[in-house]
Image (spheres, rainbow, N blue to C red):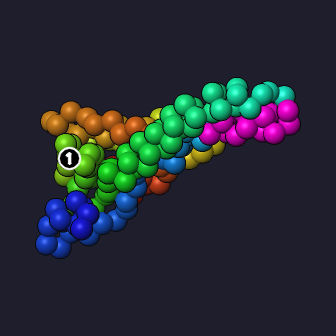
Amino acid sequence: MSYLRKVLQPGETILYRTTFSWTLYIPGILLLLLVIAVFATFELGLISQRWAIVLAPIPALIALALLARAWFQRWTTEIAITNRRIILKRGFIRRHTIEMNMDKVESVDVDQSLLGRLFNYGNITVRGTGEGFERLRMIDAPLKFRSQLPAS
């Protein structure tokens, strides 16, 4: 059972759910493409087999570690808007949670770079009255997230 389902209060419903953007996978994918390029140059005879065996395994392991880390971050992060509050949960063993009641939300800011606009991710800053603010980085579909909030 997800953390969100466990902490819902009676009568509270989830309006919108999101997580980190899929772009977390890009470094691992690029490194895997580099490994494939090394093997392709070996197959074409541009480099020797010895160099292919030396050059490929270490970046391949690093790429797999980056992909596993990105998957784990996405899997262990839950961000939701309910009819009463905003809930953020990060982590698996060591958990970090933030909850802000809707009546405390003062404003919601969205920051998107050019790549963020192209790939539909960005940073969201939720400002609360008397509670400071919380910045959510690399969130998938940040404009849709903001549109679900009454303070948008």
- Kindly state the secondary structure of the residue where label 1 is placed: loop
Q: Which residue is mark 1?
A: 93
Question: Foreground: 102 or 62?
Answer: 62
Please state the horizontal and vertical placement of residue 11, each as a whole percent of the image.
17, 73
Of residues 122 and 146, which is closer to you in this image? Answer: 122
Q: Main secondary structure of the magenta part?
A: helix
| Span shown in magenta | 32-45
Q: Residue at x 70, y 28 (%)?
A: 50
Q: Quadrant of the N terminus?
A: bottom left
Name the side, left or right, on which 77 lies relative to 31.
left
Q: Is residue 96 left or right of residue 139?
A: left
Residue 85 appears in the picture as rendered:
yes
Q: Amino acid at mark 1?
A: Ile
Q: Residue at x 20, y 47 (%)?
A: 93
Q: Position of residue 91 (x, y in %)?
A: 26, 45
Question: Where is residue 19 shown, x and y percent of the image?
Answer: 40, 51
Quadrant assignment, res 55:
top right
Give the residue at x 40% y 37%.
Answer: 137
Residue at image location 81% in from the left, 39% down from the top? 43
Using residue 50 as the reference point, say whether residue 31 is left or right of it. left
